[in-house]
Image (spheres, rainbow, N blue to C red):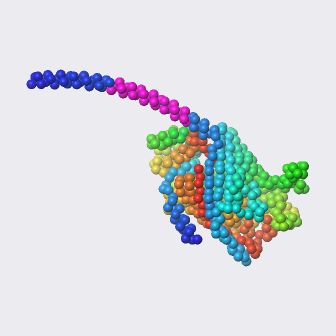
Amino acid sequence: MKKVALSVIIGLGLLATTASADADKGQRIYQKKLKSVCGFSGGVFAAKHTQDEWADAKDNGELGKVMTEACPAGKDFFDSSKFKKKFSSHLYDFVNDFASDSGNIPSC
Amino acid sequence: MKKVFLSLAVISGLTMNAFADDISDMKAQIEALMLKIDKLEKKQKSQTRSISKIKKQTSNDNIKWDIDFRTAYDGLKYNRKNAKDVTNSAVFTNRLWLGMAASPVDGLVFRGQMAVYSTWGGNDLPSTDPFQNVNWRASSKPDDVTFKLRQAYFIYTFNKDTEHPISISAGRRAASDGFLANHREGTKNPGSPLAHITNMEVDAAMLKVDNLFGLEGSYVKFVAGRSYDNINQTSYYGTPYTSVDAVDTDVNFFVMPISIYNDGQFDLMAQYTYINDFMGANTNLISAMNPAGAVTGAGDKHMGAVSLEVNGLNEDNDFLDDSTFFISGAFTTSVPKSGYTMLGSDKTKTGYSFWTGFIMPDLITDNGHLGFEYNYGSKYWAPMTWAEDTLSGSKIATRGNAYEVYWNLPIINKYFSTQIRYTYMDYKYKSNIEQFWADPELQDGDATSAQDLRIFLRYTY
C-alpha cells in the first residue's frame, strides 16, 4: 500500500505543469495591494475593460499603463519592479476572468 | 569628350523624368493605400465595438455554467475498543457539481448548483442510515447517481454606491465550503460560514451589510433558516402539510457570520449560531426503529467561533509569501429541556475546540502546496459538521485529537488538479456526529481511532 501511495505521489509530481499565472492569486493580490488604494472592488476594476482590451494591453507591454488609467491611485504599484516581475501575470489572469464581457459573475 | 558628356546629360535627363513619373505614381498609390488603411481601421474599430457589444450581451444575458468533477479513492481503517479493527481498503466515488450563474441586471444575481455524489457501484447506505439523505447533507455524502439540488438562491444588492451596500438573499446554499475548510478540500476560495462550527447544506434567508465597522473588508450577515419541518400529514389524512404531533418541533436556526477585518493578508472572522428545538434523545421514545430515541425539540444549541487566517507570511520571501497559517477557537453549548437529554446529559454542557493549520509550497513542483492541520475537541464538543466531506466521519467534530496532512497539486493550471490527503482521528470520546448517544464515554465496539487516505483527480471549468 505504501509503495502504491509513493508511486502515485511521484507520478502526480511528474504530471504537474510548470508555473503558470493564477487568477485566484491575482484576486488576492488586488485585495492586498489595490482594493483600499483604488477604492473599489476587484470585480469593478476588472470590468473597466473587455477581455480583448486587457489582452491588447498585455501584448503591447502596456498592462501597467492601462491598469494605472483604470486606477490612477495605484500608479506607484503599477510602476514598481515587483509588479512587472511578480504580480502582473496573476493580475492579468484575474482581470481577464472578470472583464466586462467575460460573462463571469464575481462571488458575493 | 563633349559628345560623351552630352550623351550622359541626355540619358540622365530622360532617366530623371522617368523616375519623377514613377515617384509621382508611387505617391498616388501610397496615398490611396493610406486611405484604404484608414477606412479598414475605422471598419475594424467599428466591428470590434460591435463584437464587444454582442459578447457583453450574450455573455451576460445567459446562464453561465461551470463544472466541478472529482473522482476519488478513499482507504479507511477504524480501530475499536475491545473489538476487531474494521477496514475498507478501497472506496471509489464520483462527485459532479454542475453550477450555474446569471446576472441579467446589475445587482441581481442567481446562483444554482446540481450535484451527484456517488459510490462506484451500488450500496445499501439509505436502508441502514436514516440521516443518509437528509437535506443537511443530501449532496455531501456519497450515495447513488441521482442529481440533487445543492444550491439555488438569488442575491439582490442595493445601496451599492453608498458606504454600506446591503444584500438580501434566499434559497438553498451549501454552507459546506466554509472558511478554513477550503484548504483541506483543495478549493481556493472559501464560503463565508466558519467551517469550525458549520458544515451543512442549509435552506435560509440572508441579509448582508458591508463595511459595518468601517474596517477593511468587514461585513456582517444575518441568516435565518429551517433545518427540519415536522410535517408528517399527507393528503391521505385530509389535512396535508401539517403535523399530527402535539408539539411543533420544527428546528430553526439563526447564524451571524461576521468578517471583522480582511485586507487580503489578514482575514479575521467570527460567527455565532443559535439552533432552536434541536435534536436530542428521549428515552421514552426508544424503539427498534429509533434505538437512540432521537427526537427534535430536545433543547437549544449555541455555538461560536473566531478564526484568523494569515495569507502570505512575508512578502520579501517567496516561500513565506506563498504560505498560509490559520488558527481558530470555538465552543458549542447544549441546553436540554426537562425530560430530554443532549449529548447523553440532561444538563447544560459546553464543549471546546481548537484548530490550526499551515499550508506551504511543496518545494517540488511550481504550484503544489502541502498542508498540515491539527484539531482538538473536548468531551462535549459537538459542531454542526454533518456535511463535512470526510468519509471516515467529520474530522472537525473529533472529540480528542485529529491530525491531517495533504498535498494539493495543480496538474493543468486551474482546470485539472489532484490531492492526496491523510487524516488520523484519535477519539477520546464518542466519534459519531449524530450526537444522540446515551453516554459520551467510549463503549466496547466504539471506534477509538479512524484513518482515511484520499487521492482524487478533479476537473474544474
Dominant SS of magenta comes to: helix
Magenta stretch: give its range. B26-52
Find residue B73 and report its horizontal and vertical position in percent. 62, 63
Q: Nearer the viewer, residue B251 or B445?
A: B445
Q: Nearer the viewer, residue B367 or B241?
A: B241
Q: Nearer the viewer, residue B337 or B241?
A: B241
Residue for point 18% across, 22% down: B10
**Residue B37 on the magenta span:** yes
Residue for point 56% across, 55% down: B416
Q: Taking the image as drawn, is residue B448 in sight? A: no
Residue for point 30% across, 25% down: B23
Find residue B355 and report its horizontal and vertical position in percent. 65, 63
Residue for point 68% across, 47% down: B112
Find residue B207 and report its horizontal and vertical position in percent. 72, 46
Q: How many marks?
A: 0
In the image, farthest residue toward the front: B121
**Residue B191 on the magenta span:** no
Q: Is residue B326 left or right of residue B377?
A: left
Q: Taking the image as drawn, is residue B69 in sight? A: yes
